Amino acid sequence: MFFYFNFMVEPIIQRDKYNPKGKISAIMVEPIINIKFKEDQMNSKIIDKMIGIVGEDWVVSSAKEVESYIKDETEEAIAPEPCYDCIVVKPRTTEEVSKIMKYANSEKITVVVRGGGTGCAGAVVPVKPSIILSTERMNQILEIDDNNMMVYCEAGVTLFDLEEEFKKHDSLFFPVHPGDEGAQVGGMIVQNAGGVRAVRHGVMRNHVKGLEIVLPTGEIIKTGGKLIKDNTGYDLTHLMIGSEGTLGIVTKAYLKLYPKSSNSGSLLISFDDKKSAIEVVPKILKKGITPLAIEYLERQFMEKSADDLGLKWPAEKGKVDLYFILDEKKQDDLYEVSEKIVEECEKNGAVDSLIAETYKEQRAILEIRSHGYPSVQSQVVDILDVCVPIGSINDYMDGIEMLSKKYNAYIPSFGHVGDGNIHNFIITEDGTKPENYEDLSEEIFKLAVGLGGTITAEHGVGKIRNSRLKLQYTDKHLDILRQIKKVFDPEDILNPETGITSL
Amino acid sequence: MNIIVLIKQVPDMEKVKFDREKGVIDRKSAGTEINPFDLNALEAAIQLKDKDDNVHVTALSMGPPSAESALKEAIARGADEGILLSDRTFGGADTWATSLTLAAGIKNIGIYDLIIAGMQTVDGDTGQVGPEIAELLDIPHISYVSEIEEVGSKFRGKVDIWDGTYLKEMELPGLITVTKDINDPRLPSFKDKMKSRKAEIPVWSYETLEEYLNGEKIGIKGSPTVVKKIEVPKATTRKGKLWRENIDQAVDEMIEIFKEIKVLEG
Ligand SMILES: Cc1cc2nc3c(=O)[nH]c(=O)nc-3n(C[C@H](O)[C@H](O)[C@H](O)COP(=O)(O)OP(=O)(O)OC[C@H]3O[C@@H](n4cnc5c(N)ncnc54)[C@H](O)[C@@H]3O)c2cc1C
């Protein structure tokens, strides 16, 4: 029997929550009771085996604690129903991961890898009794190689850790930033995360140069390295990227770094109507201007989000904003590029343009933007994540306008307009599915695919979009994907019913 | 009404590095910005100007020639003009010498009704310069203002300090220092930013201010205080402890720890 308590973790909140009068013993004792009494949920043989591999402190089997490992950020209304009969195992090393997988494979026990749990497609939610393999302890940045401009790190390093590390670094940075900094490198790789800065730097796929992978059968393989070119055989690195935790477990990764430019600025350009704001985006890109980010933001969302955070959204005039993040080598370049953007926007009816240059002011805008979804999460039924070719973005938005009239629904739009990836929200007062949900969402998917687009740009198929795959792929295409899964995971133990596998 | 806003250019404290060995700030390690509290001071002035076309806002700074960019930024954010007090002899000044120099600059401007400063700077943290200037100019002052109101010819400031809230009134001319709660500084419009880059910033040297200054009392020579060393406390890291056997003893030990780190009252 053991007892663990980390006294640096917001002890005041814990006292208030559990025992406002200040007697402290209840906080202490509760976890012990849970750990000891719920062990019989999953086969105790499996628990013992896991303890044998990672040690007693790193196996969690109490229902209460397991509960915080079985959900992600998927909207309540469409999230898969999680299975509670799971245990959480927290390995520290690749070898421990390998041992866990060898055992699970031989016993045909389902394993779901858990990163930061920030996914938006239920990929990380276990739907069968499972070993949840949490990578939280595999959190070391192993090497920053300035000459090769690469970072080598473990899969459990969070986006927050990376941002902090490179805030300190003199000259290099890692460009990908999906909104939630709790996301881990492993999760970002297998979800091929995108985020705001993708306009200039692309998605994870552009920056992952090599991997250490534990296969579902427990063997360890290594792909790529600190290389810019590598044509030896089929590229398994790229097969892992976007595999949604179904083909193997990423344990380490080489990520490409980029030189920082010290002249960054954010522009907020306001418009009275959506159409004018959207229309101008391809025009700007066509001029050869490539900001880090171009985001389309509807004002009422941003005001709500800012309010939530105790901040203020800086723009006041107009109804929608385009948010540009720029980063240029020289200060003069920053202003020159800004001037071109502002000019183009004004030609298209912009009513105001603001510029933020200090770290704090730019950070506040990004924070409010990133909090956009969490601030309305309780009302959102589904954040659609389609992407269309950037040249078709106007047609797509017209289509959304039409559907909004047809279904008499308010369908706000939000996000990465600079790469054709606008998130449309299906939203109700309390976040419950409206009657027409299936039809409406299906029509939006068809609209996107009809324009040469995709049903998911960055959140993935996960466990929520499987039934829509046929809108985009032929049977043969899907069959190839299924065969690939079989090669990697013959017993179908790694994150089943995710992505492609359940079809 | 003529308002003077005091502006200091400081290193971007989010990025700045400290040299632990030498006990100094490595000013080259980060870009510069306007002291964040001074942005609140400027915003307070601009809000008064929004209400009354007759308000004229002058941003005043003492600093190296490079501080010109902070004054241009102040113009981008709505100030009508900026004046820089810069001279080798001003360098190395403590709060007292700084206040004397800025007060001389204000005397040289001549006509003013209200002076607004930030409550303190983020690279010095003393909070002394504002009130010292008011004393040197022999005008009333209110520090740590979080709300202002014009009441006839007077200014009323709300001040939250310790557990109390004070409403203080002063006659003009007077000086206030403001907290960050007073407003949310606006971002400059891109147009104003561009215009401000072309603005001319007059630089006043020791010579310009000579009639108001005593050469012995400015800069490092005139500074009775010196910062000998800055101690940067090491960031606290998470600590954990594991009890495996005796739970009662664990609870006792933890209560002691909670008392020690003061999360348990009584
Ligand atoms: C507020 C908010 C904003 C967001 N914005 C964006 C955005 O702009 N762009 C974007 O792309 N995404 C965005 N996301 C989604 C999310 O952050 C990403 O999908 C993220 O990359 C997932 O990382 P994670 O570590 O949280 O993975 P998890 O959610 O823990 O897991 C996701 C999947 O990856 C698997 N997995 C995790 N780690 C490993 C590993 N080491 N090896 C193998 N499989 C693994 C899991 O099994 C699961 O299938 C946002 C999420 C939130 C909450």
Image (cartoon, grey):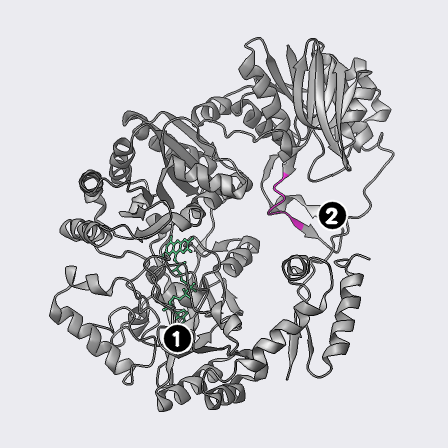
State the extent of the magenta-drawn residues as a range. Answer: B11-17
Ligand 1 within 8 angstroms of badge 2 C-beta: no
Residue A106 covered by magenta stretch: no
**Visible in this render: residue A346?**
yes
**Visible in this render: residue B89?**
no
As displayed, is residue A93 above or below residue A279? Answer: below
Residue B16 covered by magenta stretch: yes
Check disc 1 and report the residue beneath it: A112
Residue A372 placement, left or right of A472: right
The amino acid type of the residue labelled 1 equals: Val
Q: Residue B112 carries which label?
A: none
Check disc 2 and report the residue beneath it: B24
Mark 1 element type? strand
Q: Which residue is drawn at 13% across and 51% down?
A: A450
Q: Distance between the residues labelled 2 and 1?
A: 50 Å
**In which chain is the residue bearing label 2?**
B
Are dots 2 and 1 in contact, CB under 8 Å?
no
The quarter of the displayed image where residue A471 is located: bottom left
Q: Residues within 10 Å of mark 1 (few under 14, many from 20)?
A: many
The amino acid type of the residue labelled 2 equals: Val
Counting from the top left corner in percent of width and height, residue A336 is at: 39, 32
Q: Residue at x 32, y 26 (%)?
A: A346
Q: Residue at x 77, y 77 (%)?
A: B249
Residue B210 placement, left or right of B224: left
Quarter of the image where ligand 1 sits? bottom left
Q: Nearer the viewer, residue A502 or B178?
A: A502
Q: Nearer the viewer, residue A193 or A288?
A: A193
Ligand 1 within 8 angstroms of badge 1 C-beta: yes
Q: Residue at x 65, y 37 (%)?
A: B10
